[in-house]
Amino acid sequence: MRQRLADWIVKYRYVLFAAWLIHVFYVHYFLIGFLSWDGFGHRGFPIIELFQHGDLGKDKFNEWSLVGYTPFVELAHLPFLWLFELRGLIIGFPLVVLPLCVYAVYALAHELTGDKRAATFSAFAYAAIPLVNQQPFTCYIDFSVIGILAYWLYALVRVRRPEGRVKNAVRLVIATFLFTMSRSQGPYVLVVVFPLLAYALFLARDRWKLRIADKQGLRLAVLAIAVGMAPAIAVQIHKYLAYGSPIAPMQLSFLGLKIGTGVPVETYFQYAGLGGTDVKSLLIGFWNGWVWHAKWPLGAFYASQFMAAGLLFHAAVLLLPVFLRHATRLEKWVLGSGLLVSLLTKDFAIPRMSYTLMLAIALVLGRSLAALAATTRWRAAFFVVLGLVVIHLLRPEFDLIQLKTRKAISPQLNVVGSKHFIDGGWEVPVFPDHDYQLAIVQETANHFVLQMYGKRLSNEIVGTVPAPPPGDRCASYRAFNDAHPDVLYVDDLDLTKDCQRECVIKGWRCFGWRITP
């Protein structure tokens, strides 16, 4: 029965995935909407600015995270913003980027195992990870980096094939380019991973002596990676010269060395919800992010502070002996190198940054489920784990249950104006579309900006002004008003209450003031 069920899933894998994808998209599009925090701020508005004006608008906002910011995966939003306006933010990623990532995981698992069952189960396990299937609706890109990493590993493994080596090398160039451009830490991850996998792929050992068993494959791999990495290295050299850090705004910390200036890793980990990079903080982050978080409602998964992989992490750990018993030598090296990267970078404490661990979960579950389907033992284990994967594919229904508690698991935006939208207690109202020219007074509440553009993206943000000095009565805004005669001021902190002003954009509070200096 297990083998028949597994073969049925493999046979109809595309139909099953399409049905699931339509279901997830429908629930978000009409019921949940845009679910994010950072998406309302620095993850969302730069791509809107690029769409509207051809640049990221860095000079308009008081936002430290924009220093040295270079979008890459986010560029996939542009054609969908052009076609669907603000709705494009929840159309392009889930309907195009996510399927490509799922296929990349399938391709990698199939290349490693040669087994369609293992590949199919790995792909569905990846899609079932709550962080992965929620992030496409949030402006976060970590889910795509996991998929791109899978594609890079697939391209690297393919290079060892004697047939079509030039084609495979070109694929590796493209994969390296995608991975190293998608995350500024990408080149440094490859510096650790490639030598380990090169040993498994291209070297052989005669007792205590090492020899290169595939010189041509190794040369092609090194050359392809060097060529593919060159654009990212050029970008990082530019950042270092312009901003003092190759991964600005962050300070580069690699294998214990700190290079350049910027926000230290310790501070960045604090922004991510940890106490720092001390052992206690890392263990607390690991426990909350992967193992257990009993508070209800659990919260959103996209930022990954609380059980980002749901119970699939636990299932992968329990099935690790099954995986190790059936995995090939190369699979074990892939898993081991991923674990090493996670330990060296300490990203195991922040699941959304743990690209190698997230991918490892999918590969372990895929190989293990395929093995359990083929054996005459462990029948219950197969159905329990498969059931867990199916349940996690229903993550949107879990979100609906949480939202109905109205305990604000995350800010929401009713992007399409759906009448069936479920407000979970923190709906962010969208500004009306009237071609407004808006200026931010010092900063917005929670640094939320995305909603100001309107559903048709007709509104424009012209800049940020400081709070008026005491007794100034906004006289200091006269030059700004002269430069932008139709400007309305967004003053969430009520810093202009002593000025002569009139509310123009009205809501549960005033969203836009006309100020007369």
Image: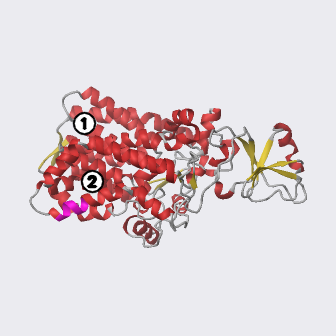
Q: Quadrant of residue 69?
A: top right
Going by the numbered disc 1, the residue's amino acid type is Arg
**Which residue is at 23% across, 34% downward?**
217
Crowd band around label 1 with a 10 angstrom C-alpha radius: few (<14), some (14–19), many (20+):
many
Q: Which residue lies furthest to the left in this view?
A: 376
In this rendering, the answer to whether 474 lies above or below 148 is: below
Q: Which mark identifies residue 335?
A: 2
Among the two numbered marks 1 and 2 on one chain, the one whose residue lies closer to the N terminus: 1
Q: What element carries label 1?
A: helix
Frontmost residue, 146 versus 32: 32
Q: Quadrant of residue 497?
A: bottom right
Q: In which quarter of the image is the N terminus?
A: bottom left
Frontmost residue, 20 versus 287: 20
Q: Residue 53: within the magenta?
A: no
**Which residue is at 63% across, 38% downward?**
456
Does 143 sit left or right of 60 as displayed?
left
Does 307 sit left or right of 87 as displayed?
left
Q: What stretch is highlighted in magenta?
A: 380-385
Q: Which mark identifies residue 158?
A: 1
Frontmost residue, 460 versus 194: 460
Q: How many labels does the image show?
A: 2
**Which residue is at 33% across, 34% downward?**
172
Main secondary structure found in the magenta portion? helix
Does 374 sit left or right of 76 as displayed?
left
Q: Residue 383: within the magenta?
A: yes
Could you say where residue 372 lies in the image, as x and y percent from the top left? Answer: 16, 57
Going by the numbered disc 2, the residue's amino acid type is Leu
